[in-house]
Image (cartoon, grey):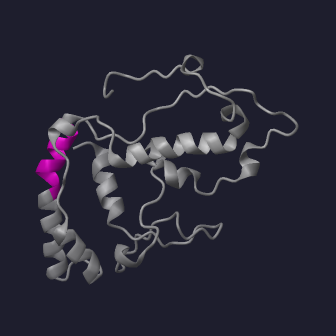
Amino acid sequence: MKNWVLAAIVISLVKSNTIKGDGDIKSCLKLDRSETCHYTNPFPYRYYGSRTSYHIATENQTESDLDVGECKPGMFYLLSRHATRYPDKETIEEMIKSLPPLKEKIINNYLAGKAKMCHEDIENLKKWNLKMKPEDEKILSATGQVEAESLGRRFKEKFSWIFERQIFSEKFIIEHTTKQN
């Protein structure tokens, strides 16, 4: 299994409520073996470098983040990496093989008193099943579709003067890889 998959699993099982120096309770992880409870935590999953969700990465941006003073851009270029996709076939197969036993170990350790989690999280974990299939490899996830649409809406809002005039398709060049059309 790729290390990031295991890291994401472990991180997702830890409650993020340690306060950083700037007081942001949403960003850090508490790793002191105290009881965790994602069920009651409105911000359980936050920043994961290149795996951070678009919504999380942009939630605190304001108009001043795009302040260009007296200038008014007339166009912009966007070279963008894909939105959230499913992993490659080998990683999905490894997740299918590894995650159900990990789920059972967590539940069994909780029942044996070796893990401190809230009852609601254990109940949610009992109901959880991996929905990815190897044939889903590299395709855009539902979250990725929402992220891509949000990015388009955000640019339209931030640069409305570019989009308020009539738009002709020949003025736009949109290219993509062959991973998914």
Q: Is residue 114 above or below residue 55?
A: below
| Front residue of this view, candidates 44 and 181 | 181
Would you say residue 130 sits in the magenta stretch? Answer: no
Q: Residue furthest right?
A: 70
Quarter of the image that includes the C terminus: top left
- Residue drawn at 80 percent across, 38 percent down: 68
Image position, residue 75 (x, y; %): 69, 26
Task: State whether residue 80 is above or below residue 119.
Answer: above
> Which quadrant holds residue 166?
top right
| Count of all numbered marks drawn on residues in the image | 0
- For image coordinates 40% across by 70% down, the residue present is 31
Please say if 42 is above or below 60.
below
- Main secondary structure along the magenta-highlighted residues: helix
Magenta stretch bounds: 90-99
Asked if residue 66 shows in the view, the reply is yes
Horizontal and vertical percent position of residue 135:
16, 36
- Give how far across and how far down residue 30 sits, in percent: 44, 71
Residue 66 location, x and y as percent? 73, 43
**Which image quarter holds the N terminus?**
top left
